[in-house]
Amino acid sequence: SIEEGVIFTPGSILGTKSDFMRLTYGKASDEEIPIGIKRLAKALGKITS
């Protein structure tokens, strides 16, 4: 995910099921949100395929 410019944490690290994840975000403009979603989707695609 770092390669895509996003970071997420598996839920198992936080005491929940391993098929959960925690997303955290800072200040993002309306223009940046779709870009971040696309980056996250690409990163998730890499680990689920």
Image (spheres, rainbow, N blue to C red):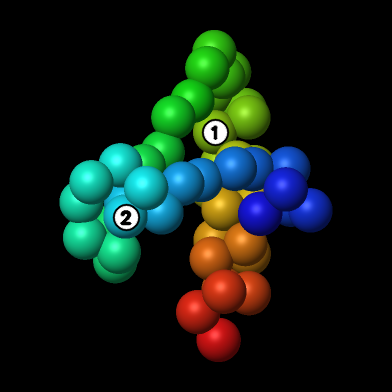
Q: Is residue 12 visible?
A: yes
Residue 24 percent coordinates (x, y): 44, 29
Quadrant of the rendering where the N terminus is positioned: bottom right
Which numbered disc, 1 or 2, marks the residue closer to the eye?
Answer: 2
Q: Is residue 49 shown above or below 42?
A: below
Q: Would residue 21 be seen by someone viewing this image from the given angle? A: no
* SS of the residue under disc 2: helix
> Farthest residue toward the left?
16
Badges 1 and 2: C-beta atoms under 8 Å apart? no
Quadrant in the picture for residue 28: top right
Residue 15 location, x and y as percent? 23, 46
**Disc sitting over residue 33 in the figure:** 1
Residue of label 2: 12
| Residue found at x 21% / y 60% | 17
Say which residue appears at 64% left-offset and 43% top-offset. 6
On the rendered structure, is 16 left or right of 35?
left
- Element class at badge 1: helix
For image coordinates 41% across by 38% down, the residue present is 23
Residue type, numbered disc 1: Ile
Disc 1 or 2, which lies upstream in sequence? Answer: 2
The residue closer to the viewer here, 39 or 17, is: 17
In front: 21, or 40?
21
Q: Give the farthest residue toward the bottom.
A: 49
Q: Position of residue 46 (x, y in %)?
A: 63, 74
| Residue at 52%, 17% in the rendered image | 26
Q: Residues within 10 Å of mark 1 (few under 14, many from 20)?
A: few
Q: Is residue 28 above or below residue 3?
A: above
Q: Amino acid at mark 2?
A: Ser
Quadrant containing the C terminus is bottom right
Q: Residues within 10 Å of mark 2 (few under 14, many from 20)?
A: few
What percent of the width, then of the height, locates residue 29? 58, 18
